[in-house]
Amino acid sequence: MLRRRAASAIGVLFSGVLLSLVVAWSIFGETSEAANEITCYILFGATSFLALALLGKGAFKQSTPLTFHAAQLPFAILAGVLGFGVSWAYVSVLTLALSPEGGPEVEAMTPTFVLSAVILAPLVEEWMDRGILWNATRRITGVPMTILVTSALFALSHGLAGFFLALPHRFVGGLILGTLRARSGSLLPGMLAHAIWNLLAVTV
């Protein structure tokens, strides 16, 4: 019964993320990346609560381990910098190979965009991926497969546009954040690492 509930929750999270991306894209398209992302986060939240309901009593507490020790801080910072470095290197090399005359367009650094990237993204995505999905997947399988599954949803949640440009490096970033989650036993180091990664991405 627990495994069935967990499998249903996993299915809801993956299908809910896909549906959220489609809905947000159909409303905003390319007109406002920040509005598109914020809409996705609202829909991700609704999907997450539905998955929690499927997981049953106690799922919220199990999906929000928030202990934090000072010894975890250097690893969180390192994970954030490493995630950004992997993304930057991958996108730079692939962009240069595909379009030698110009780099990728950069979103204007509006307050809404910074709020979305540096605050909302770490909170919502880490809770959904390495909180709820982590809890559901661990009911079925071990830590290595859980890291892979959560990394897949993490990559998918960033959209399908620019498939080869976006998904591979975000999957690798998900592996880094998943490893941090496994070693720390908490969401907070991953949230901090994610915030550092995104802050570097919007400022460098």
Image (tube, helix red, strand yellow):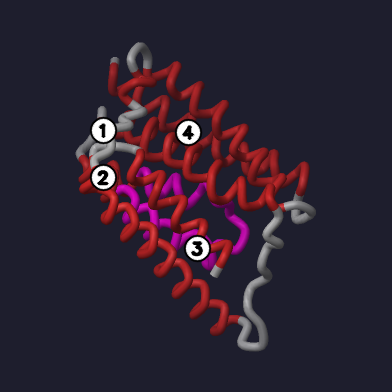
Counting from the top left corner in percent of width and height, residue 100 is at 61, 87
User: What is the magenta range?
Assistant: 149-178
Number of numbered discs visible in the structure rendering: 4
Label 3 or label 1, whichever lies nearer to me, is 3
Q: Whole-Å distance between the Cαs marked 4 and 1?
A: 15 Å
Judging from the image, what secondary structure is the residue with disc 4 in?
helix
Which is nearer the N-term, disc 3 or disc 1?
1
Judging from the image, what secondary structure is the residue with disc 2 in?
helix
Which is nearer the N-term, disc 4 or disc 1?
4
In magenta segment, residue 105:
no
Counting from the top left corner in percent of width and height, residue 197 is at 45, 58
User: In the rendered image, which residue does mark 3 sit on?
Assistant: 200
Classify residue 195 as left or right of residue 158. left
Quarter of image, res 181? top left
Name the amino acid, label 3.
Leu
Label 2 or label 3, whichever lies nearer to me, is 3
Q: Quadrant of the N terminus?
A: top left
Mark 2–mark 4 contact, CB under 8 Å?
Answer: no
Q: Whole-Å distance between the Cαs marked 2 and 4?
A: 16 Å
Which is nearer the N-term, disc 2 or disc 4?
4
Q: Whole-Å distance between the Cαs marked 2 and 1?
A: 9 Å
Classify residue 191 as left or right of residue 204. left
